[in-house]
Amino acid sequence: MEPGMGSRNPQEPLTPPFKAESLFETDHPARARFVALLCAAISSEDDPKIASDLISNSLKLCGGSTELLSQILQSEWLDDNTPFHWIISNMQIRNSKRLPALLEQLLQVCIRPLSQVARDSIDSACCKRGNDGLFQALERHRLLHDTPASPPTLFEDSTQISASKVSFVIPMFTERMLTSTAIVVRFILRGMFLGVVLGKFKT
């Protein structure tokens, strides 16, 4: 049993209402409950049912407040970082272009756009694991969170990394250069962030 959980039902809403900042208190009962839920879900991070149950139970702890859950997911209360960082640091590395169900559903519940703190924590975790595949999938997903009123056109740029070379596939490159100042491709290689900027520059 997690410290501070006592004998109460882990799905029972906490009263009185708490704030996201409350989880920075190591002895706060809400913190112990969220840690327990995350630990139970991390071993099955690509199971949609497990991910859905995590969201449902977390919302119950938050009294049904999506805004509170979004703040909790984007706050650095878990090992001095966000839950997103903890999940990416502890999940399996897979060769897949799609997001695991757990990350996909947690991102969907967050209020748009993602905070810079959350973005930085996600980037840091991907870099720490050297997980460029997941980083590229998250880059594509997070474009949807930038300007919800008028989302940008989403192109499936892809990066292929081997021991000796990095190659890029940039669909509709010529057309995009006509309407964009620059195209930026970011990737992770040997635990470092690297990037290529393709743009129109005055000489």
Image: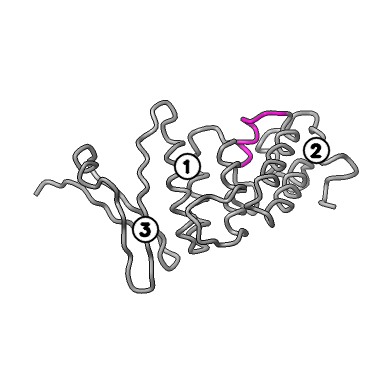
Q: Position of residue 84 (x, y in %)?
A: 58, 49
Left or right side of 169 for 8: right
Label 1 or label 3, whichever lies nearer to me, is 3
Which residue appears farthest toward the bottom when viewing the image? 164
Kindly tell me whether residue 85 is visible in this rendering: yes
| Badge 1: residue crowd in 10 Å (few <14, some 14–19, many ≥20) | few
Q: Is residue 82 visible?
A: no
Kind of residue indicated by mark 1:
Gln
Q: Most extreme residue toward the right, as rendered? A: 7
Give residue 116's mark.
Answer: 1
| Spatial CA span between label 1 and label 2 | 30 Å
Q: Does residue 117 show up magenta in the picture?
A: no
Labels 3 and 2: the sequence-earlier one = 2
Q: Residues within 10 Å of mark 2 (few under 14, many from 20)?
A: some
Q: Residue at x 70, y 49 (%)?
A: 38
17 with respect to 141 (left or right)? right
Q: Nearer the viewer, residue 32 or 64?
A: 64
Q: Please give the range of residues in magenta.
A: 64-73
Q: Residue at x 60, y 61 (%)?
A: 92
Label 3 crowd (10 A; few <14 / some 14-19 / many >=20) = some
Query: In the image, 172: left or right of 65?
Result: left
Which residue in the protein does label 2 denote? Answer: 11
Report whether 159 appears left or right of 85: left
Residue kind at label 3, given as amino acid type: Thr
Residue of label 3: 159
Q: Nearer the viewer, residue 84 or 103?
A: 103
Between circles 3 and 2, the one closer to the viewer is 3
Percent x, y of residue 12:
82, 35
The residue depicted at 80 percent of the width and 30 percent of the height is: 15
How many dots with numbers?
3
